[in-house]
Image (cartoon, rainbow, N blue to C red):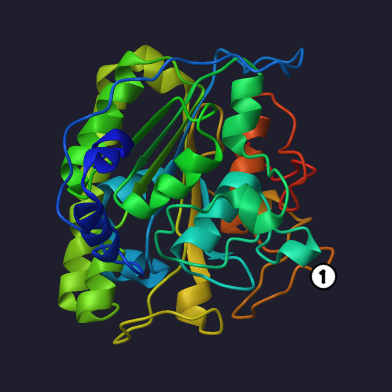
Amino acid sequence: MDRRSLLALPVSATLAATLAVGGCGSSQAGPGPEPDRARVVSARVPAARPDPSVRVLAISVDGLNPAALTKLGAKRLPHFYRLIRHGASTLNARTEYEQNVTLPNHTGMMTGRRITASQGGHGVTWDDDRPRMTVAKAAGHFVSSVFTVVHRAGGTTALFSTKPKFRLYDRSWPVAITRFHVDTAQTALVRSAVRDLVTKQRPFTFLHVSLPDQAGHAYGGMSARYLTAVRRTDAQLGLVLTALDRHPALKRRTVVILTADHGFLKGSHSHTPRVYADYRVPFVVWGKGVAKGRDLYALNPAYQRPGTRRPTYAPARQPVRNGDVADLALDLLGLRPVPGSILDRKQNLRVR
């Protein structure tokens, strides 16, 4: 459900909606799309503008274990494999070091920061819906994001999510996120995102989907239900790619960055930062100008292949991390990195 619908609920109904999405779960489907709110131009607009020939779509598949991609294969996951085979990718990227749950890791994707506030992180350590909290309150100061950088450069943005607790980001960057939309019915959400992608000229869109995460918590990682959820997500990814195919001009401008906030250990109903199957995630880049069929580590010798290890942020050669999304997206748009970011702050993650 969107923000205005939730605010209209009585207190008891709002509490029920909040409790229904505690942890990594979800609730019943919300109402239809929210129209764009009026864009307020920031007083701090730098000279740089987003490259008008590029649009970035970041997709986070909540709870996606890369082992599911290899197990199911290209025949059953044609759209995931289209991105992998025609883009630059790795199935051995890493989550944030401190935690690998939904809100802490997605905040990292949006800010390019680690989690621990005392070490320059964003400070979001919880994973439930806290209506009074913002990223600024968590960090103790304002925290910039990919949304604020694009907005200050004169562009519009959108955030689509299957989890109402993503309202954290709408509260944190209410002007910079031009359109914020939540729908726990994943197919409906993806269709809303596709309509927006086709009809609006936004430099940056973030799409969050979570069927694998829901199935993992309910039935166990890599279970039959979990694998079915991955296949359903592939079909919905197909809706995005089909829309791009039908709009060649849009396709020629679009870059897709796909990753996950965490994996899911086989048979487990939860995930921790110390388990390989949980801290290993995919990182796939596809579209305008991206190298085809290339391994990201081969393209980036300055990055360290982690093997099965869980590196801290200390080594000079880092693994590819899901938190690289923000500054990679800005680099593709021709914009400088998120102020205060740590991950890919030099914008040297190469995808071409």
Q: Nearer the viewer, residue 71 or 316?
A: 316
Name the image quarter holding residue 219: bottom left
Q: Position of residue 297 (x, y in %)?
A: 65, 57
Which residue occupies the extreme front position in the image? 11
- Residue 211 visible, this angle: yes
Q: Nearer the viewer, residue 98 or 19?
A: 19
- Answer with left or right where residue 125 lies relative to residue 18: right
Q: Is residue 184 above or below residue 286?
A: below
Q: Amino acid at mark 1?
A: Ala
Q: Is residue 204 above or below residue 318?
A: above
Q: Quadrant of the C terminus?
A: top right
Q: Position of residue 190 (x, y in %)?
A: 25, 38
Label 1: element kind: loop
- Residue 324 visible, this angle: no
Q: Is residue 21 above or below residue 294?
A: below
Which residue occupies the extreme bottom position in the image? 267
- Answer with left or right where residue 347 lies relative to residue 284: right
Q: Residue at x 27, y 65 (%)?
A: 19
Q: Residues within 10 Å of mark 1 (few under 14, many from 20)?
A: few
Q: Residue at x 15, y 54 (%)?
A: 28
- Answer with left or right where residue 3 lies relative to residue 262: left
Q: Quadrant of the N terminus?
A: top left
Number of numbered labels in the structure image: 1
Q: Position of residue 288 (x, y in %)?
A: 51, 26
Q: Position of residue 337 (x, y in %)?
A: 73, 36
Residue named by callout 1 = 314
Q: Residue at x 70, y 43 (%)?
A: 142
Q: Residue at x 77, y 12 (%)?
A: 47
- Answer with left or right where residue 125 lies relative to residue 120: left
